[in-house]
């Protein structure tokens, strides 16, 4: 049976993957409180519809650092994808390319950026650097992203070490032991423990690509980004996987959006997205782009690249439906005035 909703894709993915692998994918830090709060806080938000607005066909297209993409929905980076499909990130990129949006992959992935690009010559790729190497290694990652014509580089700042995740430890499944690999293992996560905000300045100085800082949750860190003239701020708690602080992406976006001049930066957010109305809520809170993660792996596991494409297609169709029924026509219609917490 093929899935027709994201909810059904998740159920079918559990059957396809098996319980242990599924638990690893879905687990959050410690008892998963922050993971669950991403969903809870999105659910609390109400959207005010405006009717008889002559919406017509809503404009979903967006410009992502010079690339015109289908909608504000993009792919978040996720590691260890070859445990879900033998070609992992290559197959995911194929599915994302079909939907004409941006696909971010990372140094923690199983398939190298060179191999992803070789099999996806026209994909809009972004590269995410986990700072698990010295500055020479960081430079090599920057230059390789430039060589492979990436649209941007994201710096992951929120995942120095593997978190304690009770559910996947109790399942006795470690994804690091499964799936083929062509991407070299990063030198050492211990190196990342010693970096400070000077690393962000260093990467910005040594690349001509747009630089995005991923893992921002506070005004403090957003101000640090702006002071270093970073091109994009990616609000994320790593899908609730890394730090069980209870700060949801909704919490963070609400506070960061209050900052003066924040709207001059490209804002990306992820966390808890499972339906089109979730996208509207994040856009009304001030995000320019919304990234999805786990649902794409559900699609990959169920129907390979076609499943990946279908996840984006369903979300885009749901988003357009919600925009029509809610009276949202263009980007300017998304505003905090249209929602209530």
Image (cartoon, rainbow, N blue to C red):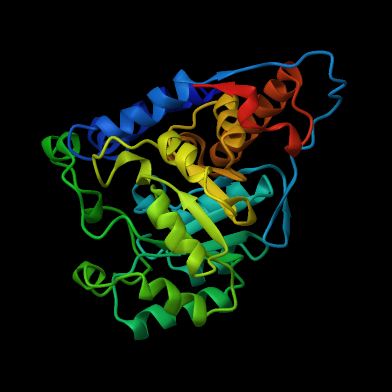
In this orientation, does residue 86 appear?
no
Residue at 43% across, 82% down: 140
Relative side of 45 to 132, left or right: right
Residue at 60% across, 48% down: 96
| 85 vs 65, nearest the viewer | 65
Relative side of 212 to 338, left or right: left
Q: Is residue 62 above or below residue 209?
A: above
Q: Residue 86, image x and y in percent?
A: 40, 52
| 269 vs 170, nearest the viewer | 269
Q: Is residue 192 above or below residue 54?
A: below
In which quadrant of the rendered view does residue 327 lie? top right
Q: Residue 22, image x and y in percent?
A: 30, 34
Toward the bottom, the furthest residue is 136
Q: How many marks?
A: 0
Q: Is residue 15 above or below residue 308?
A: above
Q: Residue 165, image x and y in percent?
A: 18, 40
Relative side of 192 to 69, left or right: left
Q: Residue 25, image x and y in percent?
A: 31, 39
Residue at 35% across, 61% down: 108
| 79 vs 248, nearest the viewer | 248
In which quadrant of the rendered view does residue 106 lie? bottom left
In which quadrant of the rendered view does residue 313 lie? top right
Residue at 69% across, 16% down: 49
């Amino acid at each position: 049976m093929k899935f027709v909703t994201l909810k059904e894709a998740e159920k079918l993915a559990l059957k396809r993957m098996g319980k242990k692998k599924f638990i690893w994918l879905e687990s959050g830090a410690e008892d998963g409180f922050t993971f669950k709060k991403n969903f809870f806080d999105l659910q609390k938000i109400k959207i005010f519809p405006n009717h008889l607005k002559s919406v017509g066909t809503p404009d979903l297209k967006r410009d992502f650092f010079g690339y015109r993409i289908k909608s504000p929905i993009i792919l978040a980076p996720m590691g260890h994808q070859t445990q879900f499909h033998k070609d992992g990130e290559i197959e995911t990129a194929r599915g994302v390319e079909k939907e004409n949006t941006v696909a971010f992959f990372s140094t923690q992935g199983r398939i190298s950026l060179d191999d992803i690009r070789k099999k996806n010559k026209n994909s809009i790729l972004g590269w995410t650097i986990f700072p698990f190497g010295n500055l020479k290694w960081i430079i090599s990652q920057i230059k390789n992203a430039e060589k492979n014509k990436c649209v941007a580089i994201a710096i992951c700042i929120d995942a120095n070490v593997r978190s304690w995740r009770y559910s996947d430890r109790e399942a006795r499944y470690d994804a690091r032991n499964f799936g083929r690999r062509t991407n070299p293992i990063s030198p050492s996560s211990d190196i990342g423990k010693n970096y400070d905000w000077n690393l962000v300045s260093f990467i910005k100085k040594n690349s001509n690509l747009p630089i995005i800082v991923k893992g921002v949750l506070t005004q403090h860190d957003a101000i640090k980004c702006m002071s270093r003239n970073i091109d994009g701020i990616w609000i994320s708690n790593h899908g609730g996987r890394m730090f069980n602080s209870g700060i949801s992406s909704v919490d963070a976006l609400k506070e960061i959006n209050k900052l003066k001049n924040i709207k001059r930066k490209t804002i990306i957010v992820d966390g808890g997205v499972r339906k089109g109305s979730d996208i509207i809520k994040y856009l009304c809170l001030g995000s320019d782009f919304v990234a999805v993660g786990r649902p794409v792996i559900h699609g990959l596991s169920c129907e390979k690249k076609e499943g990946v494409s279908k996840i984006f297609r369903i979300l885009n169709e749901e988003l357009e439906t919600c925009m029509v029924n809610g009276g949202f026509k263009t980007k300017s219609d998304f505003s905090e005035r249209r929602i209530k917490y």
